[in-house]
Image (spheres, rainbow, N blue to C red):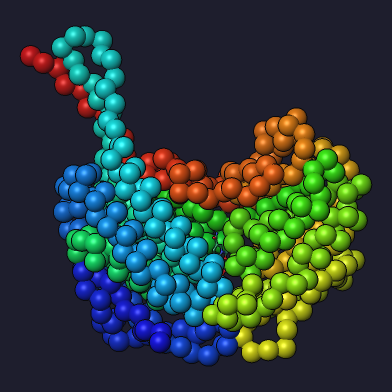
Amino acid sequence: MYPDTQLLIDGRWADAADARHLDVRNPATGQVIGKVAHAGIADLDRALAAAERGFAEWSARSAFDRAAILRQAAALLRERSGDVARLMTLEQGKPLAEARMEIGRGAEVIDWLAGEAQRVYDRVIPARAPNVTQTAVKQPVGPVAGFAPWNFPVNQIVRKMAGALAAGCSIIVKGAEETPASGAALVACFVDAGVPAGAIALVFGTPAEISEHLIASPVIRKVSFTGSTVVGREIAALAARQLKIVTLELGGHAPVLVFADCDVAKAAREIALIKYRNAGQTCLSPTRILVERSAYPAFVEAFVAAARPIRLGDGLDPDTQMGPMANPRRVAAMQRLVDDARARGATVALGGDAPDRPGYFYNPTVLTDVPGDALAMNEEPFGPLALIHPFDGLEDAIAEANRLPYGLSTYVFTGSSLTARACSRRIESGMVAVNGFGLGHPETPFGGMKDSGQGQEGGSEAIEAFLLTRFVTVTDL
Ligand code: NAD
């Protein structure tokens, strides 16, 4: 069973005032499975008024109380993870095991931020006279508008919602219209844990209408967006007009540098495993796989051997290793990139087409010798395309890694600590992982540079994003 999803405004789940709704489809079949309420301006205005009241109430609670409520929300999410994972697979397509992992990670994010709520320290600054006390004071920035996409329906909301609540902010989240039910099930955990009415809201509708209305409102003091670079620029421009603080988690086009001095076959297997997770619809997905020329043939062979047996299917089937893409737009985007690369001389070593079955599936694809001017080497594929390309020496590899305006994540495989240090220092990337994929833990910084965004959604920086610093000086008479 898949429930219809309502809006959460001022502590009540309800349909839109004008009863509008959108269909939700199962990407594994293309069939309509339910509905999501479509908010109008009247609904957004009620959410804004409630967020203002919710902020006053929630920010007045002690950090100890806020943390206790957040921990209870994490416990509820763990308790309900089986049901939430099923909803996520039905609406987003990822295999059930990946959905469960995402929910487990979501609960860890809440726990981490609950702890951070209790570690927000003011700072006493030594004064110039003994009767003066100078303090840098942290306080919540105010009501937040958050915009979350469909690729991780729980994890994208949880980072924004738990971060805002931990800091003492209220938050209105626009969830993804394609994947509303699992996000709503997450938000229900916060409500049931005792977050007061008004401190959280969840809305869906026409994305541009919602972002324009919420960001223009004087109630909103901070904007947090995850999605494409193109839309991120629009959001940043709207926020700049109102001088609002923005966090942007945008696209990536992650380079992977494989040097001949690593265990090449092992690296190939590990990269292939990560590449096709969530059907490649991950901003951290390893995409431009650059391999030192002497290791290139062995790498390609091992990579294709690891990718070929990946079983495509409905995420509810326990044998499925890769589900469908989230929507038909992504399938069309994959075909456009593959056709273009092929026309420019790339070799399709695996896949390169959609299987003949219902739903929005695309085969795990490996393209080799992809020329630098192929669209796929420049646009974020956001899908199951691995682009393998040879390089000659460290300088060549670093130049290719830094060629694009993206700078989110980079992976390096090498047995040399000198090479590892040179890459981690010189590659323009918000996150670098050497000989592994350990990015995105709740306790570690998460964010990009250049066109991949600004600000952080992980580590201690995650709560900082929702805090202001004020300075207070008191002179004893
Ligand atoms: P899109 O840019 O239309 O939408 C991406 C997300 O942004 C969606 O959730 C959408 O609801 C939201 N959005 C779109 N316009 C908006 C607006 N004006 N105001 C507020 N929110 C808005 O693209 P898409 O076809 O859904 O996804 C494809 C691209 O999105 C990918 O190529 C990828 O670059 C990017 N994306 C990135 C992430 C990420 O984790 N950084 C997640 C999902 C999608």
Provide residue 12's location: percent of width, then percent of height: 21, 73
Provide residue 132's location: percent of width, then percent of height: 18, 15
The residue positioned farthest toward the top in the image shown: 129
Provide residue 395's location: percent of width, then percent of height: 82, 37
Name the foreground residue: 435 vs 57: 435
Q: Is residue 49 visible?
A: no
Q: Residue at x 67, y 33 (%)?
A: 425
- Establish if 87 lies above or below 138: below
Q: How many marks?
A: 0
Provide residue 401's location: percent of width, then percent of height: 74, 46
Q: Residue at x 76, y 67 (%)?
A: 307
Image quadrant assignment for residue 195? bottom left
- Establish if 182 lies above or below 263: below
- Establish if 10 lies above or below 63: below
Q: Residue at x 28, y 40 (%)?
A: 118
Image quadrant assignment for residue 467? top left
Q: Residue at x 88, y 55 (%)?
A: 298
Image quadrant assignment for residue 219? bottom left
Which image quadrant: the N terminus? bottom left
Which image quadrant: the C terminus? top left
Q: Is residue 438 visible?
A: yes
Q: Decide if residue 443 is on the left or right side of residue 59.
A: right
Name the foreground residue: 361 vs 75: 75
